[in-house]
Amino acid sequence: MSRLTPMAQRVKYWYDIAGTAAERSIAAKESIWVVAQHPSHLVREAWVEPIAVLFGEDPASVVAFMGACRAYMADRLSTMPYKAYLATPEWQETRTAALKRATHKCQLCGATARLNVHHNTYERRGHELDSDLIVLCEGCHMKHHGKIRVAS
Ligand SMILES: [Zn+2]
Ligand SMILES: [Zn+2]
């Protein structure tokens, strides 16, 4: 659908959810942070200097800013509406990893079709532990939600 690289999509995503001018300015800086974080880039520290030059900041404040960005992103992921969270690249990565761990099978009945990644707890939304998630087929997922009251 899009010819953007995964990293560019991620940067665009943070721009798109930024509503206000202030948020956009955070997103702009955050984009740099995303670039700095990306695994295809060698060493994150190697980016501190170029970022410092770009923003006219000293390297120490760039390091502090990276920390603040990380906290900001963690906060956004844990507090944004659940539906919005499900659309984030972070959740897509987490979800894909959960499916892989479960070898693309329902962890209750072993079915391989119509799999859902269900949250056992929302406590660590945005930085879920493996045990916070379970892969369930649609049938098992519905049964599961029939027994306990959970939003998704
Ligand atoms: Zn099942
Ligand atoms: Zn569920």
Image: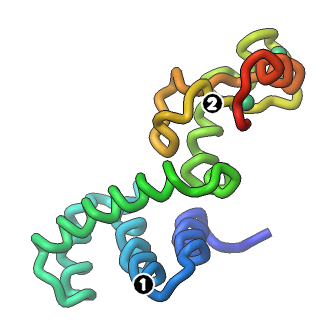
Position of 24 with respect to 69 (left or right) is: right
In the image as oriented, which residue stretches furthest toward the top?
109
Q: Amino acid at mark 2?
A: His
Element class at badge 2: strand
Position of 83 with respect to 33 (left or right) is: right
- Residue 95, percent from left and from top: 63, 38
Residue where numbered disc 2 is placed: 119
Position of 45 with respect to 78 (left or right) is: left
Q: Amino acid at mark 1?
A: Ala
User: Do tag 2 and tag 1 residues touch (Cβ < 8 Å)?
Assistant: no
Q: Nearer the viewer, residue 53 or 71?
A: 71
- Dot 1, crowdedness within 10 Å: few (<14), some or many (≥20)? few
Q: Is residue 72 above or below residue 82?
A: below
User: Residue 84, located in which quarter of the rendered image?
Assistant: bottom right
Where on the image, by quarter, is ligand 1? top right
- Residue 126, percent from left and from top: 49, 45
Residue at point 14%, 73% (across, down): 61
Label 2 vs 1, first from the N-terminus: 1
Q: Quarter holding the N terminus?
A: bottom right
Residue where numbered disc 1 is placed: 22
How far apart marks 2 and 1 lie (CA) works out to 32 Å
Q: Is residue 58 above or below residue 105?
A: below
- Residue 110, percent from left and from top: 80, 12
Q: Quarter holding the C terminus?
A: top right
